[in-house]
Image (spheres, grey):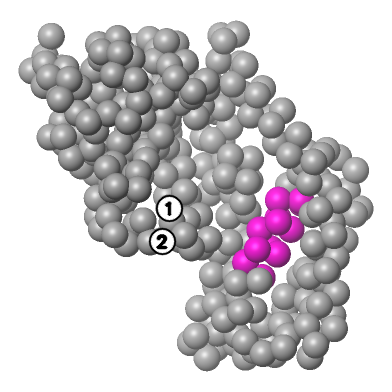
Amino acid sequence: MTKKSILILALLFQWNLLYSQTDVIRYQGIISSVMDNLDIIIGNNQSSDAVYSSFLIADNAIRNNRISVAVDPSLDSILKGVNFTVNDSGQSSLVFGRMYLDTYNANSSIHYSVLIQEYRRIFDYLQDPGTFLNRMNDIKEYYWYSLDALRAKAEFINYYLAGRFTLTQYEEYINSSFRDDFLNIASIFILRESMNYFFYFHYLELMYFDNEYSREYIIHELTENGELLIWGFNNTSDEFMRYIRYTEIYTYRKFLTRLLSIIGGEVFAENPGMGRVYNEMSNLLALHNDTQSRYYSSTMNFWEDSLFNR
């Protein structure tokens, strides 16, 4: 047993845990093995700064008891089997699920992919805990942090796991999206947000504050683009493409509301076309929510189930 493993085992007994102390004692060896093997995989490989720096900071924080470790029996998933959480009293914890721990073996790439994503969240949190927590209540910042964690996972898969492990279908999907579209399609299916439209609104916001785009130009742009999105969904019968178009509209309407609040004024009264786009999007999202939620769940369940059929 390595010195790092011994240190982890010692700390596991000391930490103020939010969940079952019995489970932590039961799984302490597995948790230690996951962390030690992740250390071996990354080693001194600095192909991805996001991965390497996140690992160094998070691993050090856990081993020095700045971040506690817990086991949550209710986490019955591998893909969502590790969470970084901060409770109301300010205690930060890396929480493992039983299924994640029960299914772990040293050659299981997905366990490391899931873990590195949460290491990235820990990294972001430790840069400025107060700012991190405050931004979690802002829809733009929340997505930005989520995308940052997804990108770290994608870079980890691409630079540290591919060619070294047999990747799962879930990891292959992320890796393909990382190479082909900079994670837009992975964001749509994993984060349920369109990365492209997120950055579209971010760009419009920057142009507005820099006085490059007028209020009138932005409203005209948003109206035309919104009409195209609605048309695209209504004229698509393919289930896969309808989910993509639905998610784009969901993202569009969410950040449309935010941007309109920034530019101010009675936008809908002044611009009936913009009001019509907003209302049509709202009605479309409400009408198709259940169907698209089922499609999302079936996709995630397919990836989850495939882990047990390898």
Question: Dot 1, crowdedness within 10 Å: few (<14), some or many (≥20)?
Answer: some
Q: Earlier in the sequence, mark 1 or mark 2?
A: 2
Nearest the viewer among 56 and 76 is: 76
Q: Position of residue 256 (x, y in %)?
A: 66, 70
Magenta residues, as a range? 245-256
Instruction: Check residue 254 for magenta coloring.
Output: yes
Q: Kindly identify the residue that appears in the image at 43 percent across and 53 percent down.
A: 145
Viewer-nearest residue: 91 or 202 = 91
- Which quadrant, please, contains the C terminus? top right
Marks 1 & 2, CB-CB < 8 Å contact: yes
Query: Residue 205, which numbered label?
Result: none
The quadrant in which residue 151 appears is top left
Residue 71: in magenta span: no
Rendered position, 12 above or below 124: above
The structure residue drawn at horizontal position 60% and vertical position 85%, both measured from the top left corner, is: 263
- How far across and down, in percent of the image, does residue 239 sit? 83, 38
Name the residue type under label 1.
Tyr
Please give the name of the residue rendered at 45% of the width and 38% of the height, measured from the top-left corner.
154
Q: Nearer the viewer, residue 255 or 54?
A: 255
Say whether residue 56 is visible: no
Q: Nearer the viewer, residue 262 or 72?
A: 72
Quadrant housing residue 201: bottom right
Pair 1/2: label in front: 2
Image mark for residue 135 = 2
In terms of image quadrants, where is residue 300?
top right
Which residue is label 1 attached to?
A: 145
Q: Residue at x 66, y 71 (%)?
A: 257
